[in-house]
Amino acid sequence: MIRNTLSLLLASVLLFSACGDNSQELPLADYTLTFTATYDGERLEKYKDYPYDDYKVAFYRFNTYLSNVTLLKGNEEIRLADVEWVDFTPDISPTNTSLDVPLRYNVPEGDYTGIRIGFGVRPDLNAKQPRDFAVGHPLAREIEYWLGWRSYIFNKIEGQGDTDGDNQPDIFLIYHCGSDAVYREFTFQYPILVEKGAGNTIELDLKKIFTINGQWFNLKEPYNQFTSNNPADVVVATILMDNFDKGVTIK
């Protein structure tokens, strides 16, 4: 009788454990986030003149770090990546057309309500240096680190402008944002379905990033044409980083 009782108890424990394990097993699916660069909704092209206020601008470099890329579902969060680096305008490219950058993840299937993205390198990772990471890691890039600031360069936006209409550039734009003070995270509410072969596109529109509260960021003002080399001066970097969420469109 005792032996039978023990056998029944053991069977019950095993059955309960098996049911518990199965409830934790969620089907996974390959999910792709594709990042793309645009200007006024059109794919960005290097050196192409775009209308800007009453003059023209052209861009030839745009890359950015992303941190804490996270899918949201109610109170649940699914971290896709701690840090990524996307380069829309690599130096070696067959054309001047900016590149799509697909990032692939294995994610529990289901409906999600949005996504959170950090623009730049989050502080705990920004406290490190490229030598702290293995070759191939996004943060192992020496050229994307600013030793004098003890910070990664969160993004690079470079270009030029023709303000007098003579078809020759007369202003040059260099925006290299960095330091913990300008790291920004934004949450975007958007229905996302993760299933086999699913994916979304995230557009970063430079025209929207440079439109501040409905007004053009004044590129004719010399102070606004670059981010300062002085680590105490993050005025321009703050203006642009505060506006990165306005440049995002999810599809």
Image (cartoon, rainbow, N blue to C red):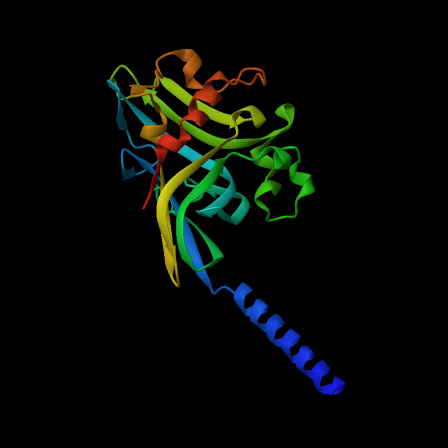
Which quadrant is the N terminus positioned in? bottom right
**Lateral position of residue 216 relative to residue 5, left or right:** left
Question: Residue 240, how many percent across, how many down?
Answer: 43, 24
Q: Nearer the viewer, residue 178 or 168?
A: 178
Q: Is residue 76 above or below residue 51?
A: below
Identify the image quadrant of residue 195: bottom left
In-front residue for pair 158/209: 209
The residue sitting at 52% across, 34% down in the picture is 120
Q: Residue furthest right?
A: 2
Q: Is residue 210 above or below residue 46?
A: above
Q: Is residue 36 above or below residue 20?
A: above
**x and y percentages locating residue 72 in the rendered image:** 45, 46
Residue 42 at x, y percent in the picture? 27, 38
Q: Residue at coordinates 35% horizontally, 19% vertically from top-left? A: 217
Residue sitting at 47 percent across and 31 percent down? 156
How many labels sit on residues? Answer: 0
Q: Say which of 163 and 214 sits in front.
A: 214
Quadrant of the rendered image containing residue 145 = top right
On screen, residue 38 above or below 21: above
- The answer to whether residue 119 is seen in the rendering is yes
Q: Residue at x 29, y 21 (%)?
A: 214
From the top left corner, tell me how far across and down residue 77 is, in percent.
Answer: 50, 48
Residue 205 shows up from this direction: no
